Image: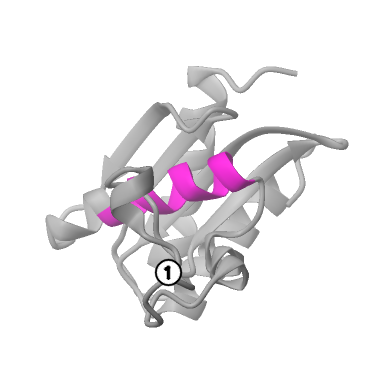
Amino acid sequence: MKLTLDMAKAMIHVAQREAQRVGNTCSIAISDENGWLVALHRMDGTPIGTVDIARDKAWTASAFKIPSSDVSKFGDASRPGFGLNPTKWNDHLTTIPGGLPIRDGDKIIGAIGVSGGKPEEDVAVCQATIAAMPTLKE
C-alpha cells in the first residue's frame, strides 16, 4: 500500500479530533516513506513554530523507520564526537517525541508527526490516529 493524499487527509482529520478531545491544539504532518511531506495542518490557535517541529518529527520517523524519540539511542547529542550532529544530516533531524512511523504490515509507508502538546500528548495523538486507521499500525 502507498500512502496517498486522501489517506493523509483522513489521518489529519482523526488527529485533529483526538487533539481536540484531550483539549490541545497542534500541527500535524504526514510524510511518505522517504520523509517527503504529503500533508500538513496547523489547527487554529496553534503556535506557528509547531509546524516545522511536526514536519521534522515525521521526517525523522520516516528516515530512521523508528519513533523520533528513539533516534537518540544512536548517540548523545550533548557529547561532542559521540552524538548526532544534525548539521551533517539536515535541518529536519529531531529526537523530540511525537513522530511515529506508519506501517502497512512490515512495510513503512510513511510517518506522522504531531507538535503542540506535551511530548507524551503528541505521541498519544499519533498512536490514536494510527490505531483509528483500519489497515495501518505503529
From this view, report whether residue 136 is shown above or below residue 25: above
Q: Residue at x 64, y 60 (%)?
A: 127
Query: Residue 59, how many percent across, how many down?
Result: 45, 42
Q: Tell me the magenta residue range.
A: 53-64
In-front residue for pair 56/90:
90
The residue nearer to you, when weighing 11 against 76, is: 76
* Residue at image point 61% right, 59% down: 67
Determine which quarter of the picture holds residue 22. Answer: bottom left
Q: Is residue 83 left or right of residue 2?
A: left
Whether residue 66 sits left or right of residue 36 in the image: it is: right
Q: Which image quadrant: the N terminus?
A: top right
Side of 70 where 94 appears, left or right: left
What kind of secondary structure does the magenta stretch mostly adopt? helix
Residue furthest front in the image: 81
Q: Is residue 109 above or below residue 2?
A: below
Hey, what amino acid is under mark 1? Ile
Residue 135 on image: x %, y %: 80, 34
Residue 95 point in image, percent of width and height: 45, 66
Q: Which residue corresponds to mark 1?
A: 96
> How many residues crowd mark 1 within 10 Å: few (<14), some (14–19), many (20+)?
many
- 121 drawn magenta: no
The residue positioned 42% from the left and 64% from the top of the image is 19
